[in-house]
Image (tube, rainbow, N blue to C red):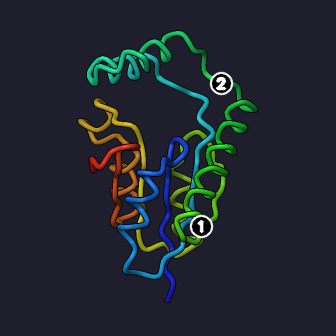
Amino acid sequence: MTQTVIVLTEDTLLDTDVRQVVDHYASRDVRFQVLVPADTDHNVVQEVINDLGLLNLRRLWHDITEPDPDDAEARVEATEALRLSLARLEAAGATADGVVVQDDPLPALTQAVHNHSAAEVVVVTRPKMLDDTFRRDWASRAREALGLPVLHLYTGSSIIG
């Protein structure tokens, strides 16, 4: 029987992310439902603290100088991230589809879990020092709300959050 695994990602899944996800579920018959939020609201102070803590000066400059995208721009960026993520999953031999969701993805994640009778959730994000430390990251919030296994991967790395 095919199980559904929901993948929540804040950016386009990189090849390393896809490889980790597909390899993790290689022994099971799964299909992936990918959710990408149209992110329009960044907490600049929080992002700056995260960037400084991780010594990511390039990202720090971006977070300080770039304004938040408007709704239309955020939706276009999320749609492209979804398209590329689905293409990479399918190229890796996975069955996947997905949707763009609102800025706060937890309500859509909860709905997707119920609609697809999902067995597990995979959250793929950049490291976020404050959110991760205080368990306010998407993965921790999903574990609390859903009571399902939630795997938290940091994009582009083999680090599990």
Quadrant of the rendered structure where residue 27 is?
bottom left
Q: Which residue position holds label 1?
A: 96
Q: Position of residue 97 (x, y in %)?
A: 64, 64
Would you say 20 lies left or right of 113 here? left
Residue at 53 percent of width and 41 percent of height = 11
Q: Residue at x 56, y 27 (%)?
A: 41
**134 in relation to 52, above or below:** below
**Spatial distance from mark 1 to mark 2, Cα to Cα?**
27 Å
Crowd around label 2: few <14 · some 14–19 · many ≥20 (10 Å): some
Nearest the eye: 36 or 130: 36
Query: Percent position (x, y) of residue 80?
Result: 68, 43
View extreme (bottom): residue: 1
| Label annotation for residue 19 | none
Of the image marks 1 and 2, the number of the one nearer the N terminus: 2
Q: Image quadrant of residue 132?
A: top left
> Considering the numbered disc 2 on the image, is that residue within a helix, a strand or a loop?
loop
> Does dot 1 land on a helix, a strand or a loop?
strand
Q: Nearer the viewer, residue 127 or 144?
A: 127
Q: How many marks?
A: 2
Mark 2: which amino acid?
Pro
Name the residue type under label 1: Ala
Specify few, some or many for label 1: CA neighbours under 10 Å numbering under 14, 14-19, or 20 or more. many
Depth check: give the residue in front, 33 or 28.
28
Q: Position of residue 50 (x, y in %)?
A: 33, 24
Residue at x-position 34% and y-position 36% = 127
Q: Which residue is mark 2?
A: 69
